[in-house]
Amino acid sequence: MATAVPSSGLRSRLIVPTLAFGGTLMALMQTVIVPLLPALPGDTGSSPGTVSWMLTATLLSGAVLNPVLGRAGDMYGKRRILVGALAVMTVGSALCAMTTDIGVLITARALQGTAAAVVPLATGILRDELPPHRVGSAVALMSSTVGIGAAAGLPLASIVVQHADWHMLFWVTTGLGVLGVALSWWVVPRSATRTPGRFDVVGALLLTAGLVGVLLAVSKGGDWGWTSPLVLGVGAAGVLVLPIWGWHQLRVREPLVDLRLAARRTVLLPHLAALVTGFAFYANWLATVQLVQAPEETGYGLGASALVASLCLLPGGLTMVAMSPVSARLSAARGARSTLVTGALVIAGAYVVRVFTSEQMWSIAAGATLCSVGTGLVYSALPTLVIQAVPSAQTAAATGLNVLMRTIGQALCSTVVAVVLTTVTSTLPAGAGGGTYASLDAYRIVFALAAAAALAAAVTAAAIPRTAIHPAGVEARGPLRRASRARS
């Protein structure tokens, strides 16, 4: 295992801010599209169902590329892959800025999904480059950028939609992307910790096929019909391919994902906690935006604009950043496991409060912010637990798998929320504007399910062994003995 050597100078001081900027860009790219969706069918001459692929494409490419690019970063250099991922994201943003062709837009959004690998790659870089006493706080800050990027993306896009052509939004993100690429290339040192060997191309293809099949069925089931032959076929194919991928990973000499390591309780349980926390986290964003925009005639809705709805989430994003040093100190004093349990319980408590206080703007914003407090603690603790349990040569791949589990949890949440909000409904009389809307009970069900998911995360976290696997002990066995240091 490589030992980080303290460095000095301007570049060394900019490593953490630069990587945090990259993480913020990643989250920004995932959320800016949401306020544009109502206008895009008319502007592109496409159906709403086709336009929704601009969300789905980013989700699928990001989910697939998280573990793939994480492994590539461990093998070929994390800075090289990080800069490449940001560059591809920037190209995707530029394509969105220059076209109204829906096919090109969907392809460009898939390219933007490449940025999903920024967080695991950055986590690996921080572990390689910083002295041990700074890693915890830096990783906590890196994790919090997910909140601030997502929170800033919604109001930014809403303002652009109201006052300018939506293409301008993507020109702005293109400029930010260019800045991110330039800073990463100049500031981040070349990777010193490598895992030499052959990249598992077959494993990458099998994982891609399996994840695309499962996530496509989950994310598009509502549009295509849950019992339609297409959804059943695609979902079944994905479910069948993933065990084949697992069998291949156990047999290949240099796997894409070390499943034997991932099956250890110190690694497996943080991954499971990430899955259910991803569900709980995403429910906060989905439900809050729709709840605030519901018509006043429903008896609970506030009839607010998309901009006002997104501003309700902005304090939560800022809070996640503010909580990062608190999380680091708590993890240093009590252990990352305790931080994870505490954060999950805060999320669960916040949702219990939201079940009973979701009819006024201030209480909705306060509940959403409290959820973000817990999420900030959880998302800061998860990568710390993972990097404590894996060798440095597998940091990016392991944290990439953890982010993938969060992504799957978010996809499941999106599906469940859509089902609940379209099933538990009430119809307004013609005198009140008419139409069918989700009832207040529907939102209460969503909050109750999210609270249950957060409690499951707390229980899972409590079962994580107190003593993590020592990285040196892991590296001393098996093919990881071949890990070496190399300069590109």
Image (cartoon, rainbow, N blue to C red):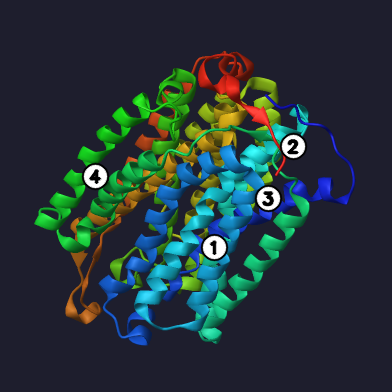
Where 39 sits versus 387, above or below?
below
Q: Which residue position is annotated with label 1?
A: 88
Q: What whole-number distance in Å separates the C-alpha atoms at marks 4 and 2?
A: 38 Å
Name the image quarter holding the C terminus: top right
Local SS, label 3? helix
Q: Nearer the viewer, residue 22 or 440?
A: 22
* Residue at horizontal 60 percent and vertical 26 percent from the top: 336
Q: Nearer the viewer, residue 235 or 78?
A: 78
Q: How many residues crowd around disc 3 within 10 Å: few (fewer than 14), some, or many (20 or more)? A: many
Q: Earlier in the sequence, mark 4 or mark 2?
A: 2
Q: How many residues crowd around disc 4 within 10 Å: few (fewer than 14), some, or many (20 or more)? A: many
* Residue at horizontal 50 percent and vertical 80 percent from the top: 161
Left or right of residue 46, residue 54 in this image: right
Local SS, label 1? helix
* Residue at horizontal 36 percent and vertical 66 percent from the top: 301
Q: How many residues crowd around disc 2 within 10 Å: few (fewer than 14), some, or many (20 or more)? A: many
Q: What whole-number distance in Å separates the C-alpha atoms at marks 1 and 4?
A: 27 Å
Q: Which residue position is annotated with label 3?
A: 19
Q: Earlier in the sequence, mark 1 or mark 4?
A: 1
Q: Position of residue 100 (x, y in %)?
A: 41, 83
The amino acid beneath tag 2 is: Glu
The reply to whether residue 183 is in sight is: yes
Q: Which residue position is annotated with label 2?
A: 129
Q: Earlier in the sequence, mark 2 or mark 3?
A: 3
Give the numbered dot on residue 238: 4
The amino acid beneath tag 3 is: Leu
The answer to whether the residue labelled 1 contacts the one labelled 4, judged by CB atoms less than 8 Å apart, is: no
The answer to whether the residue labelled 1 contacts the one labelled 3, judged by CB atoms less than 8 Å apart, is: no
Q: Earlier in the sequence, mark 1 or mark 3?
A: 3
The amino acid beneath tag 1 is: Val
